[in-house]
Image (tube, rainbow, N blue to C red):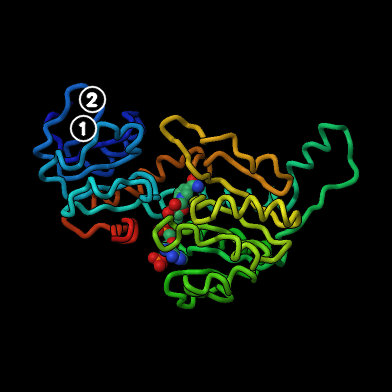
Amino acid sequence: VTRDPRLLLVARDRPVVRKAVERWLPGISFAFLEESNLPDPEGVEAVLLGSMAREGRGFEPSNYPRLAFVQRLFTGVDDLPFDRFPPRIEIASNAGGFAPFVAEHAVALALASARSLLEGQSRVAEGRLRPPPAVRTLRGQTAVILGFGAIGQGIAERLRPFGCTLEAVTRSGAPVPGLERVYRADQLKEALPRGAFVFEARPLTRATRSTIGAEELRAMPREGTLVNVGRAATVDEQALFDHLREVPTFRAAFDVWWGEDFAEGTLPESPRFAALPNFVGSPHIAGIAPGAEEYALTNALENLARYFRGERPRFLVDRSEYLSAP
Ligand SMILES: NC(=O)c1ccc[n+]([C@@H]2O[C@H](COP(=O)([O-])OP(=O)(O)OC[C@H]3O[C@@H](n4cnc5c(N)ncnc54)[C@H](OP(=O)(O)O)[C@@H]3O)[C@@H](O)[C@H]2O)c1
């Protein structure tokens, strides 16, 4: 047990984590927060941060006088209590840390919805072939990708072979090679009607929270599909529920939920969405796959290595995008 670590691991102590840290940060002393002999806080400069609600329950950033850099293990930082991190501490997301797996899952959701796989399963269970469920195709459709970061790009790459026309919404709206059209964030309402399939892959920030409400949903094609692998709260929950009931031809496929409780591994109520025939859901598993944890650790630890070499880390978070407005 290292008593005076430079790096504190606020993550569950497992061989995969230890091995990755030893590989990517050779010579850097580290300790897990959960070790019974609590490490000396004086030397801690950097933290690898998993879940604050689970393994991070005993983690108080202000207890570490020299802490300068926090690297998130997960991609999103929307759940962090930013006010508990003294302003001197820089925080990095794990942007792209799960991207290939999440992009694959986004396509899986789109296909499950389009090919009516759940209804197909019920038919088979009843021993019936016909009538066939109302299947759709991705072939030749226009897909609008909201947030063209690592996941958004991964989705585009995977949709191209389907012959999809690809468009995206980014903050700048600057042209991107291979995309038919790119819209600025404030042109969301212009972009949504274009997508037979709309993929949500934006981070949850002050600027994206609840940006898809009743009006935006009504602006989408009545035969459209909204796939969400980003964060549920960019979409207004009640508005989506009402829209799915009022427009049965509209479909949604979500991996992410409102009020997720990762400490308990539960959702606040048994979601009523699952009872809707035009909805497909998965339990926030887009980033789970063999090899995904190592991939995410590598992405995060390479960034920590940058910090320890004295270089400027990547993926630094602008807190003002997350803090509530003054
Ligand atoms: N379902 C899951 O299991 C799962 C797993 C991992 C991540 N996620 C979610 O997916 C999100 C994206 O992950 P990533 O790896 O792709 O991160 P990323 O590479 O940082 O991509 C996020 C992109 O969103 C863009 N963006 C930010 N604000 C925007 C706005 N207002 N309008 C349009 N675009 C905006 C950023 O654009 P610019 O900086 O170029 O402007 C950036 O390119 C994460 O924040 C997380 O919430 C979900």
Work out whether 292 lies above or below 217. Answer: above
Using a 10 Å C-alpha cutoff, classify the residue at mark 2 as few (fewer than 14 neighbours), some (14 to 19) or many (20 or more).
Answer: some
At 56% across and 73% down in the image, what residue appears?
Answer: 179
From the top left corner, tell me how far across and down residue 97 is, in percent: 41, 50
In which of the image's four quarters is ligand 1 placed?
A: bottom left
At 52% across and 41% down in the image, what residue appears?
Answer: 284
From the top left corner, tell me how far across and down residue 13 is, in percent: 31, 29
Q: Is mark 1 within 8 Å of ligand 1?
A: no
Side of 279 relative to 310 (left or right): right
**Where's the N terminus, which quadrant?**
top left
Work out whether 28 lies above or below 231. Answer: above
**Residue 156: which numbered mark, if any?**
none
Give the residue furthest to the top. 36
At 40% across and 58% down in the image, what residue appears?
Answer: 205
Give the secondary structure at mark 1: strand
Give the secondary structure at mark 2: loop
Q: Is residue 44 visible?
A: yes
Side of 247 relative to 160 (left or right): right
**Where's the C terminus, which quadrant?**
bottom left
Out of 44 and 14, give the one closest to the viewer: 44
Side of 208 relative to 68 (left or right): right
Q: Quote the CA–CA distance across marks 2 and 1.
A: 7 Å
**Residue 31: which numbered mark, if any?**
1
Q: Is residue 308 visible?
A: no
Which residue, given by chain and number where applicable, does mark 2 sit on? 35
Out of 48 and 228, give the one closest to the viewer: 228
Work out whether 3 lies above or below 253. Answer: above
From the top left corner, tell me how far across and down residue 113 is, in percent: 70, 50
Tag 1: amino acid: Ala
At 72% across and 49% down in the image, what residue appears?
Answer: 278
Whether label 2 touches label 1, CB < 8 Å: yes
